Amino acid sequence: MRVVAGVAKGRRLTAPKGDLTRPTSDFVREAVFATLGSYMDIEGATVLDLFAGTGALGIEALSRGAGGAVFVDHDRRAVAAIRSNLASTSLGPGEVHQADVLRWLDRTAHGPFDLVFADPPYRWTEWPELLARLDGRLLVLEAASELPLGERLELLKVKRYGDTFVTLTMPRSRP
């Protein structure tokens, strides 16, 4: 797994051992960022990478010029991999938190972010709770199926890559 584009293009990213972390493939990351270009300019953006795993999504954004990134994952091995990847790409230090994502969102002053990535484990069932808490201009959600977004969010695009559904959404405009 490597950084796809930007100042750290080609740099290798490490993943924690075991099957708890499912990194977003280079192909999917490249496709996601190509699509993001239609909706926003990454340059200077503030990014939140939830269930960050290796940090690949947030690191890709930093490599492409994002102004800052916050990474949150509950697994200590994932947090160590994120810190290592930030250091090896020279994109660090970054703000890295070892915490349960929902608890972190509830107790931490944050946002709004320009771009939020959420890529929880596929068997995760707390999407409604997560979607209610996200504060971002553009949200990129990875799941094993299409997500019910509810009234608060506007669907921009859904694309399937193998067993991964990537949903781009944003908060609905308020009258």
Image (cartoon, rainbow, N blue to C red):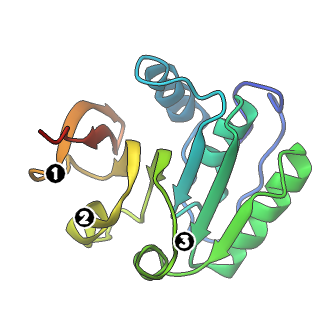
10 Å neighbourhood of mark 2: few (<14), some, or many (≥20)?
Answer: few
Image vertical order of residue 10 relative to residue 117, above or below: above
Residue at 27%, 60% in the rendered image: 131
Q: Do the residues labelled 1 and 2 touch (CB within 8 Å)?
A: yes
Image vertical order of residue 49 relative to residue 36, above or below: below
Please state the horizontal and vertical placement of residue 34, each as a whole percent of the image: 51, 20
Residue at 71%, 30% in the rendered image: 65
Q: Which amino acid does label 2 sit on?
A: Ala
Residue at 70%, 71% in the rendered image: 79
Q: Which residue bears the numbered disc 3?
A: 20
Q: What residue type is labelled 3?
A: Leu
Left or right of residue 38, residue 7 in this image: right
Mark with earlier residue (1, 2): 2
Residue at 20%, 38% in the rendered image: 173
> Label 2 vs label 3: CA separation?
25 Å
Please state the horizontal and vertical placement of residue 25, each as a whole percent of the image: 57, 40
Q: Which residue bears the numbered disc 2?
A: 132
**Circle 1 SS class:** loop
**In this orientation, which residue lies closer to the viewer: 143 or 130?**
130
